[in-house]
Image (tube, rainbow, N blue to C red):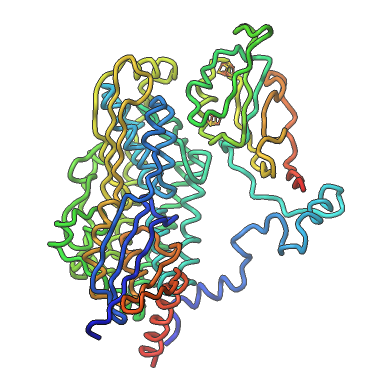
Amino acid sequence: MAGKSYTLPIGPVHPALKEPTMFKLTVEGEIVTAVDVQPGINHRGIEFIGMRRNPLQVLHLAERICGICSIVHQYSFALASEKAAGITEIPERAQYIRTIMAELERVHSHLLWAGVAAHELGFDTLLHWTWQLREWVQDVLEIISGNRVNYAMYIQGGVRRDISPEVIQKLKVMIADYRAGIDQLCKAFTDDRVFRHRTMGVGVLTYKDAVETCAVGPTTRGSGVHKDVRIDQPFGGYADLDLDYCLPEKMGYENNGDTYAKTLVRLQEVVQSLDIIEFCLDNMPPGPIRWESNMTKLLQHMKKAEGEALGLNEAPRGEMIHYVKLNAGDENVSIWKVRASTYNNILAWTKMLPGCQIADVSIIAAAVDPCIGCMDRVTVVDQDTGKEKLFSNEDFYRASIRKTRAYQRKVSP
Amino acid sequence: MANPNLGLILKQLFSRPYTNRFPVKYAPASMHATMDAVTSGKAQITPPVPAPEHYRGKIAYDREACIGCKMCIKVCPASAIEHIPGPDGKAKGSKVKFYMSRCTFCEMCVEACPKDCIKMTGEFLMADADKNSDALIVKDSGSFAAPAQPAAQQPAPPTA
Ligand code: SF4
Ligand code: SF4
């Protein structure tokens, strides 16, 4: 196939990405040979909007950076702004509730991902099953916070709502149900020969590449890198816990960084999150949930405060950083900068995609947990003739399904 | 090879659907005609799943109790609250009103209000074709002191 290469530009606008991005694939026949990622194309200016608002308002803006990991954004902003304002005495009960909320979100985010991964490969029954399981955690989040998405739970110096004993009971029932459900789900993923065929050895991110591209979260842990903010720089309720990195080797697989390894990491993390929630519920200390419950006083404190700080957090997709600077006498946030985890993980695509087939692009891209399924469209430019051919996400999806069906025919006796 | 999930499949085959068929079981030929029939009492809709206890829905505002302190405006992240100056443009007697089309349902105003004259109700059927329609602007919901009659959940008829 020498001399016959095509360029597939993907993006720039991609509704599912937190950071809309553009990447160009060079393909020879069916094989992707090179990838060029050009992030930073669609800048929403959310940080600028934030710099015209006071820290209490930005909390809710931060939550809307992402629709799935909204809690961690609010959590990180709260951590950063309270550090900048010198609020250090967060009540212990509040820290535990913060941890519980963050872990509930991890559960629903990872289940969502598992469903998307199944969908990309053409297993739609598994998708519906996973998302049915995910409904329960959404319901619990709704009971605790009052809404299904955008929970508005955190505030500088604590949380806004307590978890009542009745809700604790409900959470315990949910956790018990989930343990059984996740067990079945693990089996559905790991026992399926076609799923293993489609993911093992596909989209490999080696240990060296994971370190070099600064990948974070499950993407890097699938390659065996020991990196997790909750363990490396514990904060909140995590400091009381004895956590361990979730690596594929714990489920008897190599830490080779392929898509299967990343799936195992996420499935383990759901169980780990359930353990964390259970620990927090059992050991939740009584007491207040806020450092200052009068909003006027809190606003005045933030206005007088001078300082800058970083808020680090482990989002479902990996490490995320919020930087906040407050100036004394200025009501608004002076500087606010966010670095979300997908920014790091997108670079991993440049290492994972070369060598794969076009039919595998969607599952590999989804493996780092942005959602390529709702990609706008892609143009295939034939370099020799200069002719363009439109290639939509539908086509990618169809190619992926065709490959799954072919495997199914091959492995079925 | 028997499917390992056969039990689950059989169970689901005979159980009720997990989803609530709101507002009607199957998509009608004309949604407007259906809604008209519902409004005139000729047809009924499947009720929505009830909202949980602390649901953050449409705002209720006790205009009488409001002192016009503007605290709610200070903490509102979405600029959903408008200040209405009192008679002769004075601060005294000033009030506020809430634009539901901008509200993000964060409950900050409820917490910030020193007079407890804002509440969040369980009402969530607020879809409307006009974002400035009267149904989406909360000016006064009556006094909270006397227990208000909970408004029945009624879908707003779509404005053509
Ligand atoms: S709930 Fe939030 S967005 Fe809505 S009016 Fe109150 S403060 Fe503003
Ligand atoms: S905070 Fe309460 S009392 Fe003050 S203006 Fe708003 S609604 Fe009125």
Residue at 61% in and 37% down: B101
Furthest-bottom residue in this view: A413
Q: Can residue B37 be seen?
A: yes
The quadrant the C terminus of chain A occupies is bottom left
Drawn side of residue B44 relative to residue A6, left or right: right
Quadrant where the image shows the N terminus of chain A: bottom left
Residue A336 quadrant: top left
A210 left or right of B115 in image? left
> Residue B153 is drawn in which quadrant?
top right
Figure check: A81 above or below A137: above
In what quadrant does ligand 1 lie? top right
**Residue A268 placement: quadrant:** bottom left
Please state the horizontal and vertical placement of residue B13, each as a whole percent of the image: 59, 73
Q: Nearer the viewer, residue A31 or A188?
A: A31
Is residue A200 something that shows in the picture? no
Where residue A385 appears, x then y in whole percent? Answer: 35, 79
Name the residue at 50% across, 61% down.
A132
Count up the numbered dots. Answer: 0
Residue furthest toward the left?
A: A208
Q: Nearer the viewer, residue A186 or A198?
A: A198
In this rendering, position of residue B121 left or right of residue A187: right
Question: Residue A344, position in %: x, y?
Answer: 25, 52
Q: Nearer the viewer, residue A307 or B129?
A: B129
**Between residues A230 and A179, which one lies in front from this camera angle?**
A230
Residue under the point 23% across and 82% down: A3
Q: Is residue B133 above or below residue A156?
A: below
Question: Relative to residue A160, is residue B131 depicted above or below?
Answer: below
- Residue drawn at x 29%, y 20% is A327
